[in-house]
Amino acid sequence: SEGAVVSTLAISPNVVAFATQRGGCKVWDLRQPNRGVGRSAIVSLPWHPKRGVITSLANANGEVLTSDFSSVPFVNSENVNEEGFSTSPWFVLSTSTGEVELIDSRFMTSVARWKAPTP
């Protein structure tokens, strides 16, 4: 089991990204045919447990949804279409080990990664 969902992000009206306690980041495309009982196609971002738990996902939709489901402002609304979704294919994730990673959601590929300095 991958554990509970710790963060979610609506990439578009039909595409949702989510992070789980042990499974990393996944993108669920609701337009794809079901593959199993009640599941649509899922694309996974390769993840190693040593990188920690993903604690939040964010894009230009204007807010961050964190693992405790609180909402934090992220950027201005210039990158958001009339439906309220980001026009940018990028999103970022942060981890419990202090990493921040930039992801291209079109290809589910890591573009850049930064590690917060430790005291």
Image: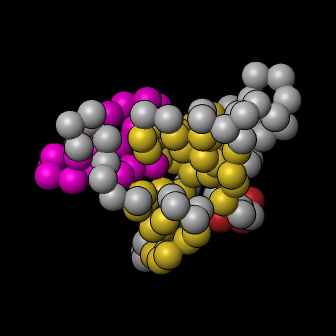
Q: In this view, does 34 lie to the left or right of 107?
A: right
- Can residue 29 be seen at all in this image of the molecule? yes
Using the image, determine if residue 76 lies above or below residue 12: below
Q: Position of residue 61 (x, y in %)?
A: 29, 44
- Taking the view exactly as shown, the residue that stands out farthest to the top is 38
Q: In this view, does 79 lie to the left or right of 71?
A: left
Q: Is residue 28 left or right of residue 114?
A: right
Using the image, determine if residue 37 lies above or below residue 108: above
- Foreground residue among 82 and 7: 82
Question: For the point 55% across and 71% down, which residue is it?
Answer: 110
Q: In this view, does 53 lie to the left or right of 1?
A: left
Question: For the point 68% across and 52% down, which residue is it?
Answer: 43
Query: For the magenta stretch, what is the residue range?
Result: 57-80
Callout count: 0
Q: Where is residue 86 in the image (x, y as percent from the top left)?
A: 31, 48
Question: For the point 60% across and 46% down, which residue is it?
Answer: 27
Asked whether residue 20 is drawn in magenta, I would say no
- Foreground residue among 2 and 111: 111
Question: For the point 52% across and 40% down, which residue is it?
Answer: 15
